Image: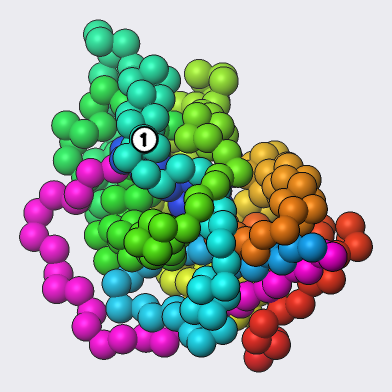
């Protein structure tokens, strides 16, 4: 069975699929957060056309609150940009769309409870996942397996002090709104969440069973991905992402490659205008030969990394 846990962690952290507005705070007392600041040096690209420019910045969607990713180059790029582009809506309307999608596609029939779909071993793994993530059982009991897997993965990371509020895209969105910048998106909430919703019910339960086996063991891999992003090691970001999705090539195509191709097409239209864009997407979309910088360079645009590779 594919390593669904690593695929979910990759999706939550670096592909933009956070399940925002779905996960609830973990139950029980939480350890005090780390206070000492950690200075990050993530990669930044700029793409030039004859009339426009677009900065490309890779987001980690959940981060510990003590990571400082600001730099003179990043802050200058944001100040120079008049349009900020994100993967999907981050405003209140986006939260409402998330809740509407969950109500329409994320709930089991009223007479079906999630634990009833699990065999004896999966039930044991389910109890262990609840204990490690601190997600209240009542939160999950009526959720479809695909959604419960996202909530458990997010809860597990929140329990380890990875917070959506500290995520890069959320911080940049707040800054853009505070400065009255124009905001645009590549996708709708429905388009994003539909990517993680299997159409085959039997496969959905099997994938959930597989994710349960991994929920208590994946945080070390998450830390490696965040470290690679923090140090600007884009090749290692690609390697970590590929490791997370290596056993699920269909997921890699669906979550990364197909979306990158669509976004590159959108960016070609953006680069035909007379604006400066600051584009924030999951870090996994900017790494490797099929990442956005490589796709735009292949289209003939001048693409530069700022600052240079460490």
Vertical side of 176 occupied by 203: above or below: above
Vertical side of 176 occupied by 115: above or below: above
Answer left or right for 46 relative to 124. right
Answer left or right for 40 relative to 102. right
How far from the left and from the top, in percent, is residue 75? Answer: 49, 79
Vertical side of 229 occupied by 191: above or below: above
How far from the left and from the top, in percent, is residue 138? Answer: 16, 31
* Residue labelled with disc 1: 93
Vertical side of 69 occupied by 180: above or below: above
How far from the left and from the top, in percent, is residue 67? Answer: 37, 78
Whether residue 276 appears in magenta in the rendering, the answer is: no
How far from the left and from the top, in percent, is residue 290? Answer: 78, 57
Whether residue 48 appears in magenta in the rendering, the answer is: yes
Answer left or right for 119 relative to 26. right
Q: Which residues are magenta?
A: 23-50
Q: Is residue 195 visible?
A: yes
Residue at position x 40%, y 42% in the image: 19
Residue at position x 48%, y 35% in the image: 189
């Amino acid at each position: 069975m594919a390593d669904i846990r690593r695929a979910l962690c990759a999706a939550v952290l670096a592909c933009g699929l956070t399940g925002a507005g779905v996960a609830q705070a973990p139950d029980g007392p939480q350890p005090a957060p780390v206070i000492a600041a950690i200075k990050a040096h993530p990669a930044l690209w700029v793409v030039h056309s004859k009339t426009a420019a677009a900065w490309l910045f890779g987001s980690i969607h959940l981060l510990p609150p003590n990571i400082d990713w600001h730099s003179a180059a990043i802050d200058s790029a944001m100040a120079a940009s008049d349009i900020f582009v994100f993967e999907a809506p981050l405003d209140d309307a986006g939260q409402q769309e998330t809740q509407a999608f969950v109500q329409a596609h994320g709930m089991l029939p009223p007479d079906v409870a999630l634990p009833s779909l699990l065999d004896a071993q999966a039930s044991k793994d389910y109890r262990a996942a609840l204990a490690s993530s601190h997600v209240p059982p009542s939160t999950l009991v009526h959720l479809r397996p695909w959604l419960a897997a996202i909530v458990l993965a997010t809860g597990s990371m929140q329990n380890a002090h990875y917070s959506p509020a500290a995520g890069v895209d959320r911080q940049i969105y707040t800054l853009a709104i505070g400065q009255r910048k124009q905001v645009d998106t590549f996708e709708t909430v429905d388009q994003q969440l539909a990517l993680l919703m299997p159409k085959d019910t039997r496969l959905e339960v099997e994938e959930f069973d597989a994710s349960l086996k991994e929920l208590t063991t994946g945080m070390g891999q998450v830390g490696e991905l965040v470290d690679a992003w923090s140090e600007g090691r884009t090749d290692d970001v690609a390697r970590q992402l590929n490791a997370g999705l290596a056993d699920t090539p269909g997921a890699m195509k669906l979550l990364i490659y197909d979306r990158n191709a669509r976004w590159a097409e959108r960016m070609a239209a953006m680069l035909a205008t007379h604006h400066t864009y600051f584009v924030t997407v999951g870090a996994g979309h900017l790494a490797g030969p099929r990442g956005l910088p490589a796709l735009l360079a292949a289209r003939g645009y001048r693409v530069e990394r700022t600052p240079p590779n460490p």
